[in-house]
Each structure stands twice: as structure tokens, then as C-alpha cells.
Image (cartoon, coloured by chain):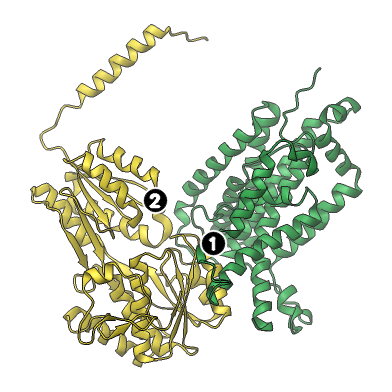
Amino acid sequence: MTFDSTVLILVTVISAATPLLYAALGELVVERSGVLNLGIEGMMLVGAVTAFGVTVTTGSAALGILAAALAGASMALAFGILTLSLTSNQVATGLALTIFGIGLSALVGSGFVGIPVERLHRLQIPGLSDLPVIGPLLFEHDVLVYLSVLATAGVAWFLTRTRAGMILRAVGESDVSAHSIGYDVILVRYLAVLFGGMMAGLGGAFLSLSYTPMWAEEMTAGRGWIAVALVVFSSWRPGRLFLGAYLFGGVTILQLYAQGSGGILGLPAQVLSMMPYVATIVVLAIIAGGPWKGRLDAPACLGKPFRPAT
Amino acid sequence: MRFHVSRRTFLAGTAAASTTLALGRAVPAQEPLRVGFVYVGPIGDYGWTHGHELARQAVVEHFGDQVKTSYVENVAEGPDAERVIRQLASSGHGLVFTTSFGFMNPTVRVARQFPQVKFEHATGYQTEPNLAVYNARFYEGRAVCGAIAGHISQSGVCGYIASFPIPEVVMGINAFALAARQVRPDFRVNVVWINSWYDPGKEGDAAKALIDQGADIISQHTDSPAPLQVAEQRGVHGFGQASDMRSFAPNAQLTAILDDWSDYYVQRVQAVLDDTWETHTIWWGLKEGMVQMAPYGDAVTDEAREAAEATKEGIIAGTLHPFTGPIENQAGEVMIADGETATDEQMLQMDWWVEGVQA
């Protein structure tokens, strides 16, 4: 592998990791508040189709991205009403919303198939983009990639350095205590869920506007599920989440490169393709196992509906 | 307002309603033939399933009131497929088209249980008295593409995004490589398997990986325009798959292999209407019009165009066969002897690679 191809691979890895990072960041905030949202896949797809549809109709990618964030947040609002106000089972509701999102996006998107759209503009900073290695690697991405990095930093700062973030974490660790101190648990969770939906929508927008600028049914291809696993993988910390997203994106891309250059260790292509998903299953199996939760620093109230005694 | 219905009333009402419905379907003078279509992907995939959907629309246009068509899209190859096919067979359909290789076993099982219903399975190899198989000689299109690639490519490497290692895909890759190596003996084909017929993100990533590793021609046996889109972005060239993908890649697309199932579908529906339907295994190609090539892109040089036309005309006339011996596999064994051409059976069971393919 030459040095040039290493740079090219890393650029592809960055774009592969970005949708995972968006969805997982949103889910991290949601889970930190104690809610388990399994509807990310559906929200990403709804975001993708909205971004694409609005961009194609209005010609403005910025409007498309905004609309995608709103669409994701709307689906999250539905999730919130069902699980927070009506205290329905979070897992079941999340799954139902995923299926709903897949179908809704396919329905809405059926009119947009086969239409190409211009890819999101890449940044071209006069001095920095021309640097030999660092230029294409760091300074020639589109706005959503940079926004994802900023969002990671923002979420990390929010959770650890702000009062609001502390309240959010408190709600996730012990909703009853937070309630008795006087914090509005349901409101905090609503806001977290809306944020999660918005981020999932942005992740979907990246897919349909930048990654593969087209609309195709089910184009997320399971990335929402990988995002859920990534949150656990990262022990609910944004910094580790960033590394996890890039690791997953990296494994996915590297196995394609490995195939293209003749394979690694004679492993069949099917085994290489399995790698990111095997890792996802292993991590998801860990979530399901009750006794492991504590050891992974999961928010103590994750998945439990809040029903105040009063 | 509370609406209270006792269980007895409810059961009685349901029984009455369903009896009425069942009896109410008195057979009219000439009931339209119901034709069902089972699609593996979305009709909006702009590729494989899109082609079948266009053919279904041709059937509707041709027969008007004589037929009623229905389709189910996104049917995964596997247990769910059997449920869908059985559902169509048991709900009054007289003819069912199952449009993917992976539907073979489910179709065979359902066909055995519903001898009155006719089934048509695409790209399979098992027939029953009421199950016919139809296939298109895509490898002929691949040979035309390979001829073009040999002339156009600078680096002499083609990146091939493939789905599953089944004979149809294998023969396509081999035909492409053989044709390209006729023009350029050192031409290589690098294959990446994405284990899916349709995953735009992965297809695009695979294309990026292949281009980064030196390919300047992109070919695919998957169904989305993503690889060509990447080719367009990177300034290299490629071939569209199953539909004309020029709108996604105006400069990159050299040509595309188009599937045209309309004539065949219309024929088979007519056969059922005339009661002359019989099972068969057909494999049509450029000659019968089931496989067609899209118009050449601007990047196709005159030399490449001539080679492509010569290949196409030769295949249609029967004077050129993409698998003409002597052909050796990568271990050096002679698979097709000198002076012979591959038989249909040899092609349908192809599980070996020619020289120059890295898969």
C-alpha cells in the first residue's frame, strides 16, 4: 500500500464514518437521558429522503439539510409521545418506528428515484487545501463532515461542562431522584429524544446528499443499528464514540480495499464483509445481557419508563 | 358514544360478511388473467427490478382488460419469498413471474403444490411441468463491454463490483476479461464482492477502493448507479448495469447493458391466454433483443466503437461466441478446447476464472 493510497483510503474512511457518527452521537445523548431509541434507522431514512426531496425540489442543499433535521426530529417527537407521555415499551416502539420509517421513506421517495443531484460542495480553502497530505485529508470535505466533528466536541462539552448536561446525566442515572429535586424528567428526555432524531436526520441527509448523491430505498443499509451498537461500544462517552465510528467505518472500507488488492491471509471475501456486522452483533449481545450493564457504565435508568409516584 | 358488540354478534356478522364475499365473486363472462410479479428489489432501483417493472407495464399496455397484474417488491431471497409466492398462487393468479435467482427453491416448492398455476422463474435452472425458466445472455453484453474496455483503458485494470459468486456473475466477469484481453493481453479485472445485489453505499465504497488501487474502468453486477457516480466523480469510465445510467454519469458511462423483458413477457402471457403455455428453458440474448446495449458515450473512440459493433454483430449472426476455445482456467487446465465454443451447460455451471481475473 503506497502512501498516496493510504491518504485516499483515509478520506474514504472519513466519509464512511460520518453518518455513523451523527446517528450515534444523537443516540448517545438520548441514552444518557435514560431512553433507548431503536428507531434510528427509520429516522435516518426519513432524513435522507427529506433532504434529497427538498434539495431536488428547491435546488438548495442547505434547505434540504435543514428539512432533514426537522424530519428526523418529527419522527423522534412521535417516539417521544409514545414512550414518554404514554409510557409504551421503548424497545418495541423504537422497532416499530424503524419499520415505519423504512416504509414511509420508500413511499415518499418513490417519486425521486433515478434523479441525480449534485454532491454537496467540498470545501476549498485556498491555502490549506493545497497542502500535500493534510490538504485532501482534512480540508476538502463538505460542511456535514466538519459539523459532525464539531458536534462531537459540542456534545462532550455539553455533557461534562454544563449544568444542563449534568441534569441530563442525572435524569439518566436516577430519574426518581432528579424528579424529587424538582427537575422535569419528561421534558429533559423529550429534548434529548428530539436532539437524537435531529442528528439521525442529519446522518441520513449526509448519505443522500454527499455519500451517494441519490435516493435509493433502504440506503442506510443497517447503519442505524451499527450506531446503536457504537454507543455501547463507546461506554457512552463522545470521545470514544468518535474513535468507534471511525474504527467501524475503517473496517468496512478496509475490507473492500483488501478484496481489491487480493485479500488478507486468504480469508474469503464473505468473511471480510462480515467483520463490521459481527462486531455489531457481539456488542448488541452485550447490551441484552443484564448483568453486563453495570460494568459498561450504562446509564442506570436506560430503557426504564418514568412513572412518578405522585 | 360507546359501541358495544357482543362476541356472538361479531362472529355471526363476520361469518355472514365473508360468506357473501365468497359467494359474491360469481365468475363473469371472461375473467381477466391475473399475473403476479415477485421482485427482489425496489422498482425504483433503476436497475434489475426496474427492467422487470417496465416489462410488466408493457404487458398491461398490450393486453388492457384481459389481464390484471400485481407485483410485490423488495421480497428478500429466503423463507419470506416462499410466503409471497404462495400467497400469489393461492389468490387466483394464473401466471407468476419470480424475478431473481434466489427465488428458485421457493418457486419450485410452490409450483409443485399449485399445478394449475404457471410459474416463470428468471435466471434459474430448475423446471417443472408448470415452471418455466427464462434467462438472458448478459455475458454477450459483457463481451461487448470488454471489447470497449480493452481499447479505452489506460491503466489496463478494470474494477468489477460483483454481488455473489454464482455462475451468472462468474460468466459475466470471464466474458468481460476474455474480450478485453483480446485487445490488450495484459488486461486485468479486479473483483470486489459486496454480497448484495443492491447496496448503493457499499457499491460506491467498493468503486472508490478499486479506483484508488488503479482501476480506470468500472464494471458492476450490482443494481444501483452508485459505482458509476463514483466513476464520474473520479473522472474514470464505466458501464451501466441493467439500465441506462447516463443521467448519473454523463461523461463516465461508455455504454450499458440493458435488459428488455417486454417481448418475452407479452409472449408468455399470450400463451397462457391461448392455452398454449408449455414449460421450457430459454436463454435469449442480443439476437432476440432481450439484451441490448445503450447508445455509446462520448468517450468511446472510433476504434472502440468498431470493435464493439463487430463483437455485437458477430454474436447476433452467430459467428462469434464470447467463450471460444482454447480457454484455460487459472490452474492451467483447458476448460474449453481449441476450436470449440462453450455449451450452455458449461456456462451455467461455470465456477472457474480465466487468466487475468483477481476475484
Q: Colour of chain B?
A: yellow
Label 2 sits on residue = B77
Determine which quarter of the picture holds residue A38: top right
* Residue B184 location (% of width, % of height): 39, 91
Mark closer to the observer (1, 2): 1
Q: Give the amino acid type for the residue marked by disc 1 in the picture.
A: Val
Determine which quarter of the picture holds residue A85: top right
Q: Are marks 1 and 2 on the same chain?
A: no
What secondary structure is marked by label 2?
loop
Label 1 sits on residue = A271
Q: Quadrant of the N terminus of chain A?
A: bottom right
Note whether residue A64 is visible. no
* Residue A125 location (% of width, % of height): 75, 77
Query: In the figure, is residue B70 to the left or right of A50?
Result: left
How far apart are labels 1 and 2 at the CA level? 20 Å
Q: Quadrant of the C terminus of chain A?
A: top right
* Residue B37 location (% of width, % of height): 29, 49
